[in-house]
Image: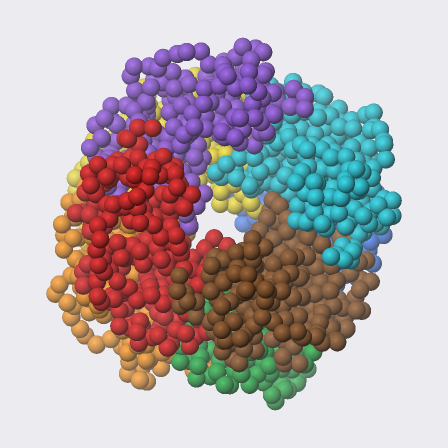
Chain colours: A purple, B orange, C red, D green, E yellow, F brown, G blue, H cyan
Amino acid sequence: MKDNHSKLDFDRFSRIGLEEAIYCEFKTGVLVNEILKQFLKKNKHCLLTRLSENKLNQIDSLIKKKIEYCSISNTAFFNFPEHSLSQDKKVAVLCAGSSDLSVAYEAIRTLSYYGKNSLNLFDIGVSGLWRLTEKLEQIQSTSVVIAIAGMDAALPTVLGGLISQPIIAVPTSVGYGVSKGGHTALNALLASCSSGITVVNIDNGYGAACAALRILKIT
Amino acid sequence: MKDNHSKLDFDRFSRIGLEEAIYCEFKTGVLVNEILKQFLKKNKHCLLTRLSENKLNQIDSLIKKKIEYCSISNTAFFNFPEHSLSQDKKVAVLCAGSSDLSVAYEAIRTLSYYGKNSLNLFDIGVSGLWRLTEKLEQIQSTSVVIAIAGMDAALPTVLGGLISQPIIAVPTSVGYGVSKGGHTALNALLASCSSGITVVNIDNGYGAACAALRILKIT
Amino acid sequence: MKDNHSKLDFDRFSRIGLEEAIYCEFKTGVLVNEILKQFLKKNKHCLLTRLSENKLNQIDSLIKKKIEYCSISNTAFFNFPEHSLSQDKKVAVLCAGSSDLSVAYEAIRTLSYYGKNSLNLFDIGVSGLWRLTEKLEQIQSTSVVIAIAGMDAALPTVLGGLISQPIIAVPTSVGYGVSKGGHTALNALLASCSSGITVVNIDNGYGAACAALRILKIT
Amino acid sequence: MKDNHSKLDFDRFSRIGLEEAIYCEFKTGVLVNEILKQFLKKNKHCLLTRLSENKLNQIDSLIKKKIEYCSISNTAFFNFPEHSLSQDKKVAVLCAGSSDLSVAYEAIRTLSYYGKNSLNLFDIGVSGLWRLTEKLEQIQSTSVVIAIAGMDAALPTVLGGLISQPIIAVPTSVGYGVSKGGHTALNALLASCSSGITVVNIDNGYGAACAALRILKIT
Amino acid sequence: MKDNHSKLDFDRFSRIGLEEAIYCEFKTGVLVNEILKQFLKKNKHCLLTRLSENKLNQIDSLIKKKIEYCSISNTAFFNFPEHSLSQDKKVAVLCAGSSDLSVAYEAIRTLSYYGKNSLNLFDIGVSGLWRLTEKLEQIQSTSVVIAIAGMDAALPTVLGGLISQPIIAVPTSVGYGVSKGGHTALNALLASCSSGITVVNIDNGYGAACAALRILKIT
Amino acid sequence: MKDNHSKLDFDRFSRIGLEEAIYCEFKTGVLVNEILKQFLKKNKHCLLTRLSENKLNQIDSLIKKKIEYCSISNTAFFNFPEHSLSQDKKVAVLCAGSSDLSVAYEAIRTLSYYGKNSLNLFDIGVSGLWRLTEKLEQIQSTSVVIAIAGMDAALPTVLGGLISQPIIAVPTSVGYGVSKGGHTALNALLASCSSGITVVNIDNGYGAACAALRILKIT
Amino acid sequence: MKDNHSKLDFDRFSRIGLEEAIYCEFKTGVLVNEILKQFLKKNKHCLLTRLSENKLNQIDSLIKKKIEYCSISNTAFFNFPEHSLSQDKKVAVLCAGSSDLSVAYEAIRTLSYYGKNSLNLFDIGVSGLWRLTEKLEQIQSTSVVIAIAGMDAALPTVLGGLISQPIIAVPTSVGYGVSKGGHTALNALLASCSSGITVVNIDNGYGAACAALRILKIT
Amino acid sequence: MKDNHSKLDFDRFSRIGLEEAIYCEFKTGVLVNEILKQFLKKNKHCLLTRLSENKLNQIDSLIKKKIEYCSISNTAFFNFPEHSLSQDKKVAVLCAGSSDLSVAYEAIRTLSYYGKNSLNLFDIGVSGLWRLTEKLEQIQSTSVVIAIAGMDAALPTVLGGLISQPIIAVPTSVGYGVSKGGHTALNALLASCSSGITVVNIDNGYGAACAALRILKIT
């Protein structure tokens, strides 16, 4: 396998303010390894998403040493310098159930890669409405809200009728039967009767964080 | 066309406590006419559903005179004796938006055909949550709740976390894009994170009322 | 992983008469463990659903000792006091084929968690109609019927024309080709030509039992 | 428009025992007219299906005079000599509801085009099971059964557990919500738990009759 | 028909900064009329969406006089005072083809209801890439971009690789075959390989504008 | 687990001429074992379908000794007496590709369980049309044709234009992309432009054989 | 409505050898009119597709005079100079049934707009195989084949096993039930067991012709 | 298992210029082995596709020795003589991301089986547009372009507006959520707003190469 199997877009940050992340789900361990070598050669860092522990272990030990891995979200920071997060929490990351944690953490990790701290509230779905309402003021103190939910995904809709900020909704593939795969959650969010909610792909915590970063850039 | 195009199940009420209703959507005016003649010959009454005004007008005037029609729900009572409704309201019929009115009225009319009064609350969807919470006590005073909603159908889910009665959810075909046809509302209801909600076919106000009647029978 | 990954709704029973159950399918063993610790700390019991044997074995032995597990339905009672079931059988749990057993047992176990005995009849699908008709009187002696079926799910429809009680139909994912995943069974039930049948999500024995419990509460 | 827009397969009967029928739904009146002229020129007759009354009226009057039209099924016999039907009824044509009449008549007309009489029983769906059982012996006296049903299409399944003949099931597009278009009926029939049922396309009364004719040919 | 068929949420603006709009597609003319009377009684104004010209003409003339209608987008301002738009154009409304105009105008009208001027660029799809690149600088001068496209919806993806602002993508139902109804455009946008694009329902120009307004509120 | 988990329909053969087969895909090894014990107790034999080798090995050795297993089709004969097949071959079993072998063998085994020999022709798909035409006469000598095909399933259509017998088409799940799962093959068969083809569920070799047996019964 | 509602890509021919065609299905008559005025102003000609007769009649008479319309294919040549077609027929346009004529003519007209004559053979579907085989040599004399078929679309597959040229397959929306809309034909073509067939969108005769023109350009 | 489980079409090359390839995904190792033996007996070579390493290892060592395997594409050349590739590169094989490599290599290997060299450019997707534009001239120097892309598959559309050659687009199953399985990529390609792009099945690199070979044959 030769190096030109990938052609990295190192220029992306200067164009759109976001770097190219390495989406590993359909890449072999061999290929991920080759890509990281290119980053190392240029002494650049990068974010990896959907890197299973299994694939992580196929990576050369010298490369692997420079990886900081999170097993909840299957994300990794490669060759990343120490850095501290912002004090303020401009983004809220909310999820409806504790089954949605991996998606929430993908968003949180992406934000933290770009230096952003976040207000993280898990398991506040609407079947126990008090869990949401008791946190409402705290949520209203942020600038952008990422709302993550599977099954019928009612959380972002209820939220949309209670707060005025931008809401980026993330459907998750949590559930069985008609919920399986997350298409019901996705469609329910697109069909939401609350106005001005936007949606990203199923389980796409990374994309939601990028959308939040685009918004923060103009504030 | 000969009479034996239909074979009426006059015995049904004695078996299951519900009469056969005449579902008119795919029957020609000629056929509906023939069926009603059979009822008249036996001096029986019946409920008709999905009878468009256009089809209503194809019916023989002698037969038509004995029809009491509701244009919001496209239902009709045929050869029905005067009767009064129950004083108490054991069933609540709720709908999320005023676009769901025709489905709500199909349920209300079916209940009233069987002599049941109902508590009717329209346009109380969760994008303005106060509309639901201010009526909560009133809703809790009934025995069975029919909750009707289109789009993302979040109303029954929120309701399911707040009340203890049986909830029969009816998805509606209101909406466009992913909501078109009501499949998103249907799936969101089946996937509801609130426990013990049951669901009927899209726009099936008639079926929801029948399910409520089955429940009332055992109370 | 910190405890606030989940926010339990201990208040739910007082609101809706049903406790929060722990749906384990998309939770890691680590997370299930954390949740059960919270229940133990408050000396509360709970019902767990979709807990695979594999995940069960990842739970701390001290916690696991307090679990009563059923391998047919993958349900568990945690920290549950001894209790006896009601004498009478107000709910019938019927299934069309012996392939539907796990769903039937999820319903039976949920009912028994709430102290309800049930009339259980397995493998009485309509391709051998006598199996249903010979039990008809027994079924008619109950208050609520949970009817479980995969493939074409004809059982609840035939039942709907023969009995007057509330029928909660549960489609199952049993089958291959067009039956795969249970969507055909689900749609056939929603489209049923028998009036007043209600439906829950595919394989949702738990939800069907909850719906039955909501009905029993008002009788 | 020139004659070579169609290339008729006059040889088909000698190959497979069935003539080419003219499926009119997507042909303009002008094109149907051209095709019938070719039949007339060769003094041949044919069967036309899905010929709307509207399109019928666009046909030249000389041609139209030779058409015998059935408005229930939208079928037509063109240039057809007088002929009488067989005495015996080897095929049963059953339908579940009177809304399925047009499909039933498409089958009946096709059989009669080939000289076959049929036992026709309408509106015998399983929500009133007695309507089927009282006719069982009569049905068992035929050689082949065409069973037509929409919605959940439970009739052929129940039938399949009661009789031993070949059953050709026809799903219909009757219904709304999940039934709309007939896909639920189709899938329920393919998934039938009764063995040895075969299925044709939605609303395809013509095809079912052809399948029955193929069977009769070998008896 | 009585007034309580609808329960208006006049409080919404104070909660979320957006008023309740009247979505007319599934409301009868009679019902729209009743709703507008309530606004008039309180001397409030409102925005109406998906109001067909046909339905517009069913409205009482006194009410209709106070309607300012746009036939491209089927939107209306009711009882709206004269007002001028902002000088600056913080939102760009782009569409890929001139077939997408009605959706673009729904967004433009919603923005203008809230006093926002917009940079409007039509027919700049990627099959003629120069049409996009020659406007790039102008687009980069805005704060938020609404990008509207049907068929394969490639425009927002290409845009996403070239600009750094928030992009709200709107799939349209323009097209035939696999494009019909807009689901391909929707899915292509959700699957976009450009990071941080968010999506709203098919043809939902109104929702995209609301999402843009939520963003502008925090800048 | 108790015996009444299954209720066997030993009476079925006398009603419909076909025995109940044991469909094993969704049954545990334990359950299959229990069922076979019941057959043994009554000294009855049965056919098992979709019995994986893995599940076969979970069966008690005493029971297993009485099983005659076919690993191509995953079918088994239990407690089956020696018997010889008919001399003549009234059924043809054809398949388009050698990837369809397991489905073909399920049909062949079912026929042989009922004592029927068959003409078996494999890998005669239409991309090499000569493979079909050179066998045409042989195929025409049978009474019923089972035609099995995956992908685009063109074989039965071409066959339908060349022979006059009943054709039972079986779509298979062979293929990838749009072919995956067999739905394209199924739909192509239902949509076939050749008249009088009937169809069974995807991969349902068993059902096709049962349908053939129903036909043979009346010849 | 202002002129800048559309931004024409007059440069396209020099880039890709194909002009921008005006796809009229989702454009109002007013908009088509505006676009044609721009062509006239520059004295350019263009091809219009999916222009219904109804929309044609909304066009200004001065503009309309310069339109040469084909009502079978709903295509139009605007401001087109007289021109003659090539003598040789390098493209074959085949369709399976006479119901596919409009799609075939869209391809033929597009080819003729670019000066290409074509070999046109209609109604040669595989249910009467001789219709195809008798023309095989003629078809083999062309360079590129456009093969159009609805329903199960078996024609291109059979063709693919018999000829060596490039085959561009066009599924059509002809059919009902599972064929409705053309998705079955589309998928059957993509799944074709004959190698090297390529496919365009449902009913896309225009696109097929463009693909053929791209091929001719390199020969 | 007997040899006649497969019937090889050795004649295919002489008919259509392409040999029969052995598609191994649904064949057992035993069956693949039998097929290769037939090739060996006739001393013929062949191409195998979708041969997993696992299945490769089930093949007899004598047969296996004659296999040249590529693990990126899971293709194999059997009994293939040494041969060199053409000097010129008439086909370009492009892919949007490095996750699409296996599909690209299936195309490249097929081309090389037929002696064709190709211009291979990987990871040039449109989210970094410069990667495509810097190679444009090189791409324009070829005769046919195979463009491979997953997710939203925007690459072929953008390409279609920039080059004049035939473009064969291959959707890949790379992605998650709505992209899963490749249907979104497929539909986006069929719906492409760039004219004259043709499409093959998802992940069908083999078919794309065959289509390119058909085109090269006529140049």
Residue name at image x 47 percent, y 78 percent: D122
Side of H206 relative to E88 (left or right): right
Residue G87 in picture, x, y percent from top left: 84, 43
- Residue reaching furthest front? F62
Q: Is residue A104 visible?
A: yes
Side of B198 relative to H187 (left or right): left
Classify residue A29 by image quadrant. top right
Q: Quadrant of the N terminus of chain H?
A: bottom right
C186 relative to G205, above or below? below
- Tally of numbered discs: 0
C47 relative to E210, above or below? below
Q: Quadrant of the C terminus of chain H?
A: top right
| Front residue of this view, candidates C6 and B176 | C6
Classify residue E125 by image quadrant. top right
G89 relative to F152, above or below? above
Residue name at image x 43 percent, y 28 percent: A71
Residue H160 in picture, x, y percent from top left: 64, 31
| Front residue of this view, candidates E183 and C96 | C96
Side of A219 relative to A24 (left or right): left
Q: Is residue E100 visible?
A: no
Residue name at image x 59 percent, y 64 percent: F65
Residue C41 in picture, x, y percent from top left: 21, 36
